[in-house]
Amino acid sequence: MAVPVLLAPAGTVEAVRAALGAGADAVYVGLQGWSRGGARRELDWDELVAAQREAASAGRSLQVALNTIPKPEERARLFERVPALLDLGIRDVIVNDVGILAALRRRFENLRLTASIGCGAQTVADVAFFRDLGAHAVVLPGTVSPAEMREIRTVRGISVEIMIHMVEEFVLLGKCWMPSYVHLKPSPHPAVLSSTSGAGDTPEGAFRGLRQTGSMKRGGVGACFRICQQPWELFAGGQRVDTRLFPSRQISRIADVEAYAEAGADVLKLQGRSLPVELLAALVRRYREAIDARTIPNAFEPPPATLPAAWAVVGR
Amino acid sequence: MNAFELNTTIANLRDLQASDLTDYDGVYLGDIYCRLYESNFLEQLGDLKEGLHILHDQGKKAYVATYAAPRNDFLPKVRKMLEASVAAGAEAVEVHNLGILRIAHEEFPELPVHVGGFANIYTAAGAEVLRGFGAVRFTPNYELSLDEIHEITATCGAPLELLLHGKMPLGVSDYCFLLDYEEKWGVKCPDLCQKELFLKQGDWAMKSLGKGILSGKDVCMLEHLPRLLAESHRHFRIETVSENPEYRREVAAVYHAALKRALAGDGDVDERSWETLRRHAHIGLCNGFYFGRSGMDYQGLRPEALGSLPTISRAES
């Protein structure tokens, strides 16, 4: 039985270093201006170069999230970046749109493309769709059970990743536009506001220096302001009957590492690009031990059924 | 025959039989959010066949919806539903999920596919990819503005179907939080989501269908029909899956008449039409994202047409 790859998040070069040191087989980062939820940690180009150097020197791989949905006028700029990524030695790119995925597949045959969790794949048929489209891998949410994974792994020719540590919000990832219903307008990208040297510092992906505040998926780097995690008043028949939160939960399926491995999951992925370095390292180490316990019996304590609340993912 | 197509959505046979569909050209059958929705056409295949026959007998186009967020265990039923739809002569199936798109394309190639709003078509490039999987019509993601939609129209080559009026889908969940209230309210599933339920934070409201979240305000494009027609749109939807038959009939009558007038060059809207729409929109009216603004905002010449709640989003005010 193959040992699954442990894929860790990182939002800084220091976090990349910490994740590798804690035993991650691979690390994913966001490229500034192009990654979903970009208000959280992203790496600029110089940081990306440094991160790739860290990964390469450790003999591991670095994946780059380009998982917004660029507007047509932004696509060309995104495509221009890809040869430079390949020159750096980065072949793994995470995308969130079928149009971008298909276009990158056609243009760059050496690129390994992952369909982001935001693509909404949950079923055996979804995985087959992304395989047919040319994806190298697809990410499934941690709500997909090991039993479902076993059925999904009947699809050959594509790597399957499970987001084994994540926050499950009430509305499915990639299927929510509640924030933009409340507030959507072009607004200056934070990096533009802090820039002192003019338009030359406009981040890539932020077309004309703007982003769409409120949309998680649109071009120009959206931002979710977590309206679902604020209290709501529930009205039935015009009468207020309750004040409540939408249900959400931390999924930390460390106790299911064995089951996912047996079901054929290729990659165990952790969410949390904004986790502080010390928490990230501890989290990665725990999952590393859980994976290694399968091949080195009695070497480690059995994994706990749950993880400490402090390890809750506070951002993607 | 109309120069436009006006469609709606109906979830079950009871609702279909109670509805006057005079001013509609087609109906999508089924609730896309939940398998347990009361007598959902997508689960009750005998009802589905009868529903398709009813629509055909009335000279309507009979379309079938599919689930927005299926899991593996949905798929056998989806296949049976598609098989039944083909056998009963459905004109097309609407898919929101890419796995179901693949199933429809490979196993039921004779069934035309419309791509729904949850499939996340944001660009012409995305639509082009799905055309390769047999899609012949698209509802783009609701977040797109008319300008962005126009870019798709200009290069896509397939018609788009746009939401003209009604509560706009905003999200779908794996879980129904209404089940928390079964004991407290003494109401069981599937009757829970038949209640009129709104979630509010200040001036911001959304309608709950349990697993589905819709806008609290009704998207209203009544005074913008001339622009939609000028931009070559001819396929429209009035979203009524969570509405009663009176809403379904009266709102369609308003839009059917307004579309015919607009096509004849008359874009004016009479006061009775506004009164009808205001009466049915308990929270108010909005334009969705069509004008590049927050989905709950309204842009137009008739601010008095709006409902009782403020229309400028809280974050901007």
Image: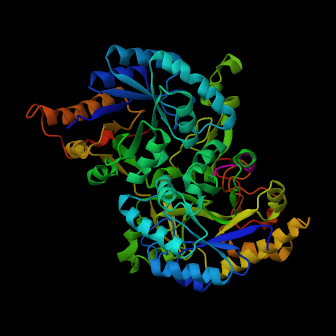
Give the vertical position of A219 relative to A195 (above or below): below
Q: Is residue A145 visible?
A: no
Q: Residue furthest front?
A: B110
Q: Main SS type for the magenta part?
A: helix
* Residue B84 is one of the magenta-drawn residues: no
Stretch of the chain drawn in magenta: B143-150
Question: Which residue is at the front of the view, A316 or A65?
Answer: A65
Q: Is A77 in front, or is B299?
A: A77
Residue A193 lies, in percent from the top left, at 65, 26
Q: Residue at x 61, y 23 (%)?
A: A80
- Where residue A241 appears, as percent x and y from the top left, is 47, 72
Please identify the quarter of the rendering in which residue A163 is found.
top left
Judge from the rendering whether residue A53 lies leftward or rightward of residue A3; answer left or right. Answer: right
Q: How is the image coloured?
A: rainbow
Quarter of the image for residue B265 reads bottom right
> Where does the C terminus of chain A fall, quadrant-wise?
top left
* Residue A30 makes an appearance in the image: yes
Q: Is B111 above or below relative to A190?
A: below
Counting the numbered discs, the total is 0
Residue A296 screen position, x and y as percent: 12, 31
Based on the displayed image, in which of its 4 quarters is residue B223 positioned? bottom right
Instruction: Examine the rendered structure and indicate whether residue A316 appears above or below residue A91.
Output: below
Residue B144: say if magenta. yes
* Picture quarter with the N terminus of chain A: top left
Q: Is residue A123 left or right of residue B254?
A: left
Q: Is residue A253 left or right of residue B140?
A: left
Residue occupying image coordinates x 81% and y 53%: B231
